[in-house]
Image (cartoon, rainbow, N blue to C red):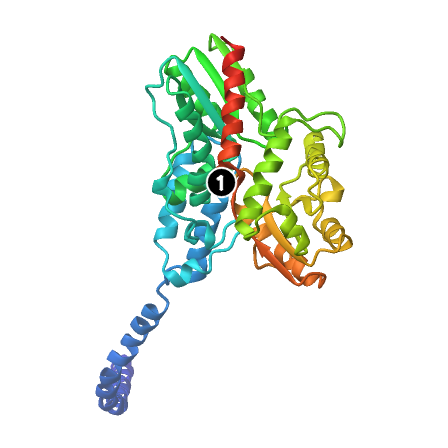
Amino acid sequence: MKKIIVSLIAAALCCSLLAACGGSAPATTAAPAETTAAPETTAAPETTEAATEPAGPTDEELAAEAAALIDAIYVQEWTEDTDAQIAAARAAWDALTDAQKEMVEGEDADPDYFGRDTGDASKDDPRNADDIGENEILVVSFGTSFNDSRAEDIKGIEDAIAAAYPDWSVRRAFTAQIIINHVQARDDEKIDNIKQALQRAVDNGVKKLIIQPTHLMHGAEYDEIMDALAEFEDKFEVIAVAEPLLGEVGNDATVINADKEAVAKAVVAEAVKAAGYDSLEAADAAGTAFVLMGHGTAHVAKVSYSQMQAQMEALGYANVFIGTVEGEPEETACEAVIEAVKAAGYKKVILRPLMVVAGDHANNDMAGEEEDSWLSMFSASGNFDAVECQIAGLGRIPAVQDLYVAHTADAIASIQ
């Protein structure tokens, strides 16, 4: 009986195998088609993988990176990382295409940071050399990134002082680190800040040190010089700080002095000459007013601007008005000056900076195309037939240079 059952099972298995073999024939026939299609199926993932490979940074991202690096050096404090940050900002800018450079925009960064043509930096002299000797005159300026103005205005003053005192070494310092960084990044010109310049003097064995500020007044920048000097006062045998351009401040708006008179006469004479008039009286008769635009300040020294207006009046300069970018003092704000010139009946206005250098404020705040520039605001007021600009700093005027030389002479005399 067991043999019969085994035989039956074996027969069933044979039938199952035969059935399976018979059912496999269509699959075997279809196999070549599947095999042929396989390469296409295998290639698809390769195509997808190639399409999803990470792309490089976009134009906008590269421009944003450069802007961030520029913003990082648009600061007033120098650190041990500053030089490396400056180099990185320059390298990032140089790597951009022209189209990408136009996209640079940050808190302070824009295409003009590196791209604006402000003249030939090689005409300037950073005056940062060693081998100073025992006697040094350190000329301290706020500074400017406008190359032409730096060479004509600041270097003009330094050259005049150097010519007057050949036995003294003349060196330079800027109080605006933002400007120092800008000039170094764009033009590869390295200018000392006040502490670096003082340390350079110490390292060179300077014994007699004269500080000549080119600042207009005893304001915030002057205070910064005095604060920095306090850390070095025991490093020299003798130190003297000369007067800034306008001399002593005085107590109220009516106080004037010989320095303010000299500056008033010098700048007005240059403005009248540049405008093509034979005299200030001739300009007055032609209905022309001159507006001298200073910076302005919240510092107590802001009264100096009111004193300069008082000085103009004392000299009989009825068609000369003093204004400030910051509008401090209040009567020097652009709107107030427009009303004053209008009330006086003048129909032509010539704007000129009352600043040592004709830099960013003169080119942008005064003569710029933006609607809030003085040129635009005077023109938009509708009160005047013509509004023109003279872009020239005080530092290039020989009479102003002579005044700085005289201030330096007083400081040298005080230590003899």
Q: Which residue is mark 1?
A: 144
Indicate whether 413 appears above or below 265: above
Choose between 373 and 348: the one closer to the eye. Answer: 348
Of the residues shown, which amino acid type is indicated by label 1? Thr
- Residue drawn where x is 50% and y is 45% of the image: 71
Which element carries disc 1, helix, strand or loop? loop
* Residue 104, position as x, y percentages in the image: 47, 56
- Residue drawn where x is 34% and y is 22% of the image: 130
- Residue drawn where x is 53% and y is 16% of the image: 411
- Would residue 74 be visible to someone looking at this image? yes
Name which quarter of the figure residue 310 lies in.
top right
Indicate whether 133 appears above or below 122: above
* Residue 177, position as x, y percentages in the image: 50, 35
Check the picture and name the quadrant holding the N terminus: bottom left
* Residue 302, position as x, y percentages in the image: 69, 34
* Residue 220, position as x, y percentages in the image: 62, 30
Q: Residues within 10 Å of mark 1 (few under 14, many from 20)?
A: many
Question: How many marks can you see?
Answer: 1
Indicate whether 363 appears above or below 122: below
- Would residue 14 be visible to someone looking at this image? no
Image position of 344 (left or right of 410): right
